[in-house]
Amino acid sequence: MLKMGLRETIGVHIEENRPIYLFTTVLFLIGIVFGAIVVNSLSLTQKHDLYMYLSLFFGQVSEGQVANSSEMFSQSFAHYAKYFGLMWILGLSIVGLPVILVLLFLKGVVVGFTVGFLVNQIGMSGFFLSFVSIMPQNFILVPAFIIVGTASVSFCLKMIRQQFMKKSSQPIFPQFIKYSLLILCVGAALAFASAFEAYVSPTLMKFVIDNTM
């Protein structure tokens, strides 16, 4: 019964917010495309400086000179948790709606730029590096960001209707509890993404660097 209740709750949430999910997903994809395009707009000097920085980093990874895994996990988890927390806070503010959309777009830009730059500069080796160091955790993070972004936008819109349009007869506090619980549940996925990034990605990156570069 609990399982059916959870499944039904998720189904209702997705159905109620289908247009917002579609919009946030498209916005995120546009950010990825924009990030990849930005790579081609960089000057040769900028590309060279970034590549030299990456080469230094790859050298450290190859020699095993990377930060302690537990420290990397803490930093990674804290970074993503702050991002989620900021979106949650913005969802409680009527004026936070455009900022949530900007954050989603920028997340897409970062992913697109990083993958695009690696492939542009290192070719297939860059693709393999992206595949082992960026894509795995983003299989968790990207849906998580879209869910949190959608939930934040949805709650923002509910507050706008409640405050200005007077079209919602439902009390806002139970909706706030549901919104906060959803953010916490999705936030639990950050631990898996951060753990992979800290404990698995460095080893995979070292393997790719040693064998393809």
Image (cartoon, rainbow, N blue to C red):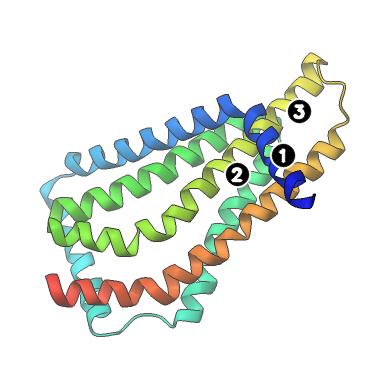
- Residue 138: x and y in percent read 42, 54
Q: Is residue 169 above or below residue 10?
A: above
Front position in the image: 116 or 90: 116
Q: Is residue 83 above or below residue 65?
A: above
Q: Residue at x 55, y 32 (%)?
A: 21
**Of the residues shown, which amino acid type is indicated by label 1?**
Glu
- Residue 53: x and y in percent read 22, 66
**Of the residues shown, which amino acid type is indicated by label 3?**
Met
Q: Is residue 16 visible to us here?
A: yes
Front position in the image: 31 or 53: 31
Q: Would you name the residue on which mark 3 appears?
A: 159
- Labels 3, 2: front one: 2
**Of the residues shown, which amino acid type is indicated by label 2?**
Val
- Tell me whether the residue at label 2 lies in contact with that at label 1, contact meaning CB atoms closer than 8 angstroms: no
Q: Is residue 206 above or below residue 48?
A: below
- Residue 137: x and y in percent read 43, 60
Q: Would you name the residue on which mark 2 appears?
A: 148
Question: Label 2 to label 1, Cα distance in Å?
Answer: 19 Å
Q: Residue furthest front?
A: 1
Residue 194 as seen in the image, left or right of residue 4: left
Crowd tier of the residue under label 1, counting other residues whose Cα lies within 10 Å: few below 14, some 14–19, many 20 or above: few
Q: Residue at x 65, y 40 (%)?
A: 90
Q: Is residue 213 visible to us here?
A: no
Q: Residue at x 67, y 38 (%)?
A: 91
- Residue 29: x and y in percent read 38, 36
What is the quadrant of residue 205 in the picture? bottom left
Name the element at disc 3: helix
Crowd tier of the residue under label 2, counting other residues whose Cα lies within 10 Å: few below 14, some 14–19, many 20 or above: many
Residue 21 as seen in the image, left or right of residue 170: left
Q: Is residue 73 above or below residue 108?
A: below
Q: Would you name the residue on which mark 1 appears?
A: 8
